[in-house]
Amino acid sequence: MTKRIRYGDYLGQVRVRQIAISYNHVTAYDAQHRRRPRLRPRDMYRLVAPYVSTRFLDQFRAVIPVAIFLALFQWLALQSHVQGATGIALGIGVVILGLMLFMEGLKHGLMPFSENIGHLLPTRSSLASVLGVAFILGVAATFAEPAIGALRTVGQLTDREQAPLLNYLLNTNPEAVVYAVAGSVGLAVLVSMLRFMRGWNLKWLLLLVAVPCLLLTAYLAMDPLLSPIIGLAWDCGAITTGPVTVPVVLALGIGVSAAAGKENNALDGFGIVTLASLFPPLAVMLLGLFIGHGGLPADLAAASPPAANAGLMEDVAAALRAIVPLTLLLWLVQRFWLRERVQHANLILYGIFLCVLGMMGFNIGLSEGLSPLGVQVGDQLSSAFQADGALYPYWVGLALALLFAACLGFGATMAEPALSALGTTVQNLTDGALRKRTLIHAVAAGVGLGTLLGVVKIIFGVPLAWLLLPAYGLALVLTLFASEEYVNLAWDSAGVTTGPVTVPLVLAMGLGLGRAVEAQEGFGILAMASVGPIISVLVVSLWVQIREWLYRFDFGRVA
């Protein structure tokens, strides 16, 4: 029989008999007697495989299509087998593993440091301290850049007789080039921080930096001793904007920009990579000018000893020299300058360990895989059109070589993971006015055309200044007409395209081709591949601006 009672009486009865028990007491027995689960190999595979495979495939898609394209072109078009194919394949595999470990370590180790310092620095330090840390961080990030090691490798391919000063800088005194590049990147980061904090316009900064660069280029072009430095100088601007410098300085810049509260539009965070790619050419050209006219040995050719191949231990030591000082610097700044404890120290240590391991793998794979493959293709590319034993009639072979260069630049850019991420970001920030696919195709087309012009420069011996000066002049004119946010995007897109795979491959291919056609030097392809996307993205952005203006005009007329 159902008995009705008041709800208050029910609660009273329940509370009287209620006993509060801690959850820890309930689970205490299980916690003490719990058996640790035993993972079978199959379970470990199911846990680890999704984590590793995603990251491995990201690097696999960036490296393998370019490597396969080079190998197939060499086999089908140049009718030659890849020499040392097994060693090159193993080297490329080591590059993929090295890049996978390095990028994962960067995400968990170095990036959290930079983001935290970027947010805390403006609020806890004076302006002078912010600028000092920005400069030192830019220098240290450049030393950690994987592609900076490619300079030593490709330096062995320069002609001592035709370009003695260039050979001297790369083989006898490469540290001077690296120090000049690192110092200039530090200065670029410093100026970028000032721009974020003061709200300076990027257009005027570009004019202040780019115009002296172009004037110095024109001056060096008139001196036979100094002119080979131009290609190295402008290529250094592309080399420095790699997977370490870009995210580290961008994280610092975004943090400083947010803390300073000077953002005017959605794309104001861009622009820092642009300055980091323009200051190095200026520094390297000034270094060449100083050594060439003042501190150079009496006989450069005799002063340049033959370069030696870097061994395994040298690759390991280079990785430690690159990562450990940068990590110590970031830790010292955060712990003692900003007085902030390091959160999740174990995870950060894990990331740093992966960075070192990945850098070792990348250096070894670069020496054994990417560089030899690029050099072989460059050496044999001339066999398609050269008079002695040419595979094809001259114009057919020449067209084939140029088509190969354009496809290499276009394909390598399309496979660049950073460009896809940039396209997504820009599409979101512009509310779809500039679509991701449009941006990616514009950048890839610009890189392809720039790579083609770089190969033309090597084959026909065209002075690089003849190509660079009109190209950058056109880019500056377009910059004057484009809006500020698209200027930031266009000039930064040049840095995004020069990844750790594209740089050593294109550098080695260009120097191998230069040696095969007996050119003075093989630099300049990266420089042209960098200015190409600036022009193409600026043209597309002007079209977007015109389309928006026409839409507003039609809408206003209808209203």
Image: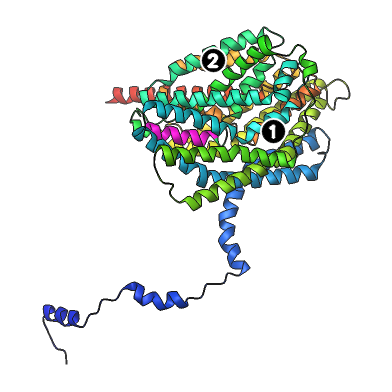
- The type of residue carrying mark 1 is Leu
Does residue 249 belong to the magenta stretch? yes
Q: Is residue 254 above or below residue 303?
A: below
Instruction: Give the extent of the magenta segment.
Output: 245-257
Contact (CB < 8 A) between labels 2 and 1?
A: no
> Helix or strand or loop: what does disc 1 sit on?
helix
Percent from the top left, x then y, of residue 163? 75, 16
Where does label 2 land, which residue? 474
Where does label 1 land, which residue? 505
Does residue 73 belong to the magenta stretch? no
Percent from the top left, x then y, of residue 191? 45, 23
| Label 1 crowd bin: few (<14), some (14–19), many (20+), radius 10 Å | many
Q: In this rendered view, identify the residue nearer to me: 442 or 371.
A: 371
* Quarter containing the N terminus: bottom left
Q: Is residue 262 above or below residue 89?
A: above
Q: Residue at x 34, y 27 (%)?
A: 264
Q: Residue at x 78, y 44 (%)?
A: 87
